[in-house]
Image: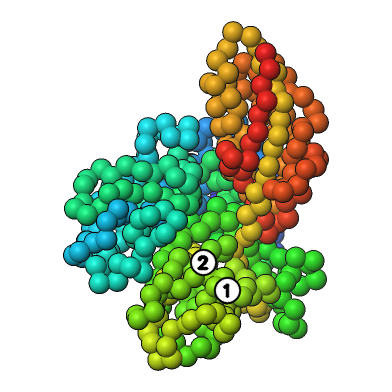
Amino acid sequence: MISVKTRNQLVQDLINAIKSRDSTIETTYGPVKDLVIDPVSLVVRDLYTQLKNVYDIQFIKNANIMTREELDALGETFGIFRKGAIPATGSVFFLCSNKPVSNIFIPSGISVATSSNVGGTTFQTFIVTKSATFAAATADSFFNPESGYYEFEVPIRALTPGKKGNVAPGTIRTLQRQIPGISGVINKAATVGGRDIESNAEYARRIRLALLGSDRGTYAGLERFALNDARVLDAKTVMSGDPLMKRTEAVAGAVDVYILGEEPTIDQQVETFLGLDIFFQNEPVIFPNPVSQIVGSLFGVLTEGIHYFIEKDVTLEGSIKARNIIRWNRGAPSLPTPGELITIEYSYDKLILDLQNNFSKAENNVLADVLFRRSTQINITLDAQVKVFPDISMSVIEENIRSAIKDFINTRGLGESIVPSDLDLVIRSVPGVDFVFLPFTVLDRDGGNESDIVVINKNEYAQISDSDIKLTLTA
């Protein structure tokens, strides 16, 4: 590490150098001090500082070979601290096989869990994060004819932080405390957002951004502002003139900051039905299914695609400026009565809202139109043939290969493309793998059937699920 000398140390070094040549020269006052020692010490001090910054930037490029303690010590000298693990979040549906005859109270803090080894996952516990009451008077509106249950959705959070809390749909089926009237529980969507403690590479990037400067008017400054939020996993900036800039209006200095990371938040919005379009009170709503239900106080449950449609704002989507619309289908066989109250339950990303509001504070004022936006998840599909060594458990090695593939793809940042040779190396590193047949049968965006580099734009990130991994193992 480079040690930056203080101004007093530099002054003394200069005095010593001058005295070594001529001990009679006056260095405490007069022209030598004013014209040589003072200005030279300032210049050298500035050069030392610049050299130290360059050295530190180069030094943390080797973060992958540094110990956690070494990098922590370096980061903390700049006031940048490693982010801890984050718990996954999602929702579950409490199920009633019979129509409730009295209200059922779901308390905050009650726990649910995955069944052991369901979907290849280990046992994971989640807690309900918001108390809710299943009202018997409106039970009919919660009946799902497809499942045959009365269903009531509540938000949950993993008890233990980390990516192991990201579990697949249908895996949370265990009630750890019985509730009268409730016959079961299930998660219809995957839990998301669980993240392990920040890796050296992720931490080093934030340190580099700090060394490059904190000016909000620069790429580095904007990304550093975003990454200082523990919920943000990655951030990328897009400026006017970039093909990814979606805003079509003539906005001078438009800058979009795409965010990887989210805080799904469920909200309820009560409106009077007038047959007119309805805007969401909080944006950005979370697609592809932002609305969990719409219930009329007299009409009951309304169905998307029959009673209403959601019209997506493709220009400002993923930002607080988005204007997504609930549009009523006037050709539907029936609709609520004009003047009837309707309750809209939907999910939005509180992280984007918080970032925009925090950036709008006076101290962050910049001469640019900065808009924070949700990034787009790109689902990857993989069909691979792998030769393994004989006398090895096929089920075990398949699960290990799946885990390695998911760890590689699902922890990548914004704009990180999926390169076949990199994925090949990941699979071959699994103990018991002999070699991988290349090219892959399929390595593409979901729905594609090509096998080449999957290009991920800087406003996108790659993800893959078990259902999108097809492995053919031969001994």
Q: Kindly identify the residue that appears in the image at 41 percent across and 72 percent down.
A: 301
- In the rendered view, would you say 224 is above or below 3? below
Q: Residue at x 74, y 44 (%)?
A: 444
Q: Is residue 244 left or right of residue 61?
A: right
- Identify which residue is drawn at 33% across, 68% down: 140
The local secondary structure at tag 2 comes to: loop
The three-letter code of the residue at mark 2 reads Pro
- What's the distance in space between the residues labelled 2 and 1, CA to CA? 9 Å
Instruction: Depth check: give the residue in front, 314 or 55.
Output: 314
Q: Nearer the viewer, residue 452 or 296?
A: 296
Most foreground residue, 307 or 403: 307
Which of 410/347 is in front?
347
Instruction: Tell me if I can see residue 30 in this picture.
Output: no
Residue 367, given in percent of the width and then of the height, sits at: 66, 79
Name the residue at the top extreme. 391
Q: Which mark is residue 290?
A: 2
User: How is the model colour-coded?
Assistant: rainbow
Q: Quick one: label 2 or label 1, which is nearer the N terminus?
A: 2
Q: Are marks 2 and 1 in contact (CB under 8 Å)?
A: yes
**Outermost residue, front side:** 333
Does the image show residue 78? yes
Left/right of residue 78 with respect to residue 459 in the rendered view: left
The three-letter amino acid code for the residue at tag 1 is Ile
Q: Residue 253 in the image: x percent, y percent? A: 72, 77
**Horizontal and vertical percent for residue 475?**
67, 13
- Residue 193 in the image: above or below residue 115: below
Q: Secondary structure at mark 1?
A: strand
Residue 310 has which mark?
1
